[in-house]
Image: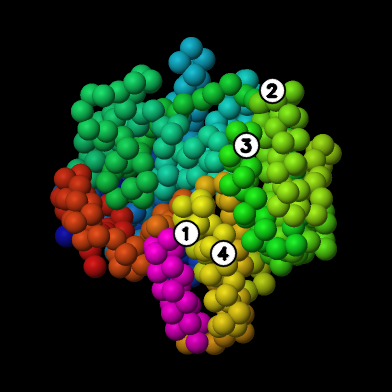
Amino acid sequence: MASYEELRNFLESDTQLITGDIPQEYLTDVLKRLKGTAEAVIKPESVEQVSAILKWTYEHQIPVTPRGAGTNLVGSTVPDHGGIVLDLSGMNRILELDAETMTATVEPGVVLADFQQYVEERGFFYPPDPGEKTATIGGNISTNAGGMRAVKYGVTRDYVMGLEIVLADGKILTVGSKNIKDSSGLSLKNLIIGSEGTLAVITKCILKLIPKPETSLSVVVPFDSLEAGIKSVLAIKNENVNPTAIEFVEQKVIRLGEKFLNLSFPYPEAKAYLILTADGRKEEVYRNLKCIQEVAKKYGALDYLVLTDQEQSQNVWKIRGALVKAVEAVSEQEPVDIVVPVNKTAEFISYVNALEEETGMQFISFGHAGDGNVHLCVVRGNLSEEEWQIKKREHMQKIYKKAYELGGLTSGEHGIGLSKKEFFLKETDETNLELMRAIKRSFDPKQLLNAHISYNK
């Protein structure tokens, strides 16, 4: 029988291997409700170490759960099948910034906020901007993270040019490159992006950069109802003003965010808000914001505040970025990140609000109005554990069913993990699932990498 102590042969320091009493942080995700088991935690520092570790686990048929900063919300990093947790957060070097090709090459453990600051200090810009800035680049790639700037700039997939990966059997290969165009066979790179660690372990990332925008300004637009705000979004997008972000949020969740951070949000009397950002050249930004203001007023905006004060702007975005944590601070909740076609967002939110009124269970809505990505917090309140589990599942089934009826999908940016697997498998065509299973078998014949995120019903 294999001994996990053998893994020390592949490492340079004893601190890179933990066996025996595994710290709880490695057995769960950021919500700490789903918990797994593991016999070892390994912290590799190079691709060679990752390769040697995976050759060993492949030979001994031991499951491996890759992990970055552990900020995942859906159980993707929970070692549900035991075995080894592969902590890649120590592989955190920025290896190269190539100004001529406008690319950066980084290791997977680089923290998003650190990377964004690094490139912006040098006149470049990395647009993907998910709410959790302490997540790692490898984790962002593994879930194809989106964020607030997706409406203008797209998602993580649009900025990954190449990857160095290690397969389940330890083979090292490169997929993608610094080349702008690529029609050279199937895109293996794009299979890895969003695969949640099920196909390979990412050890190096080549990322596309763009020039840093000259100016970026945000505005807050208050409304008497969330529906009115959402309906204005399509009109704003049709004006060709190209906003960087269009966020929607209800008053009740803003109040939670204010209390959580001890900050204030403008227009406390409003029922809902749009928060928009425009970036680019200064004159273009102000022209676009003026157009947005005119459209918003046509749809019943109560006012329009340009956040020229830097501290106020930072506070508004801090509150928006902390909303899931703010809800979690007052009650257990189940985070949902359903995506629907952008023209169906208002209809979906109306359905959720009606369901809240019908059932008495609280649903808190906010998210990315510009791309139809609706974040919901299904709030437990004072329900007992048994009532909570029954009602949560019952209402989430209804919510996902409605989203699929509108042409939506299970997840816009968090991934499937453990918590969404049931709903994803139920609503996904069997032929699609079989193709996914075949791809998984091709990359990982023994089903060892993140085995709990499978496509089997």
Disc 4 target residue: 349
Residue 138 position by quadrant: top left
Measured as percent of width and height from the top left, residue 336 is found at 50, 63
Image quadrant in which the C terminus is located: bottom left
Tell me if label 4 and label 1 are in contact, CB under 8 Å: no
Looking at the image, is mark 1 or mark 3 earlier in the sequence?
3
Q: Secondary structure at mark 4?
A: helix
**Alpha carbon distance from label 4 to label 1:** 11 Å
**Alpha carbon distance from label 3 to label 4:** 24 Å
Relative to 48, does residue 352 appear above or below in the rendering? below
Residue 125 position by quadrant: top right
Disc 2 target residue: 281
- Which amino acid is tagged 3? Glu
Residue plotted at (65% across, 50% down) = 232
Looking at the image, is mark 4 or mark 1 earlier in the sequence?
1
- Which amino acid is tagged 1? Ile
Measured as percent of width and height from the top left, residue 179 is found at 36, 19
Disc 4 residue crowd, few under 14, some 14–19, many 20+, Cα 10 Å: some
Disc 3 target residue: 239
The one nearer the camera, 436 or 26, is 436
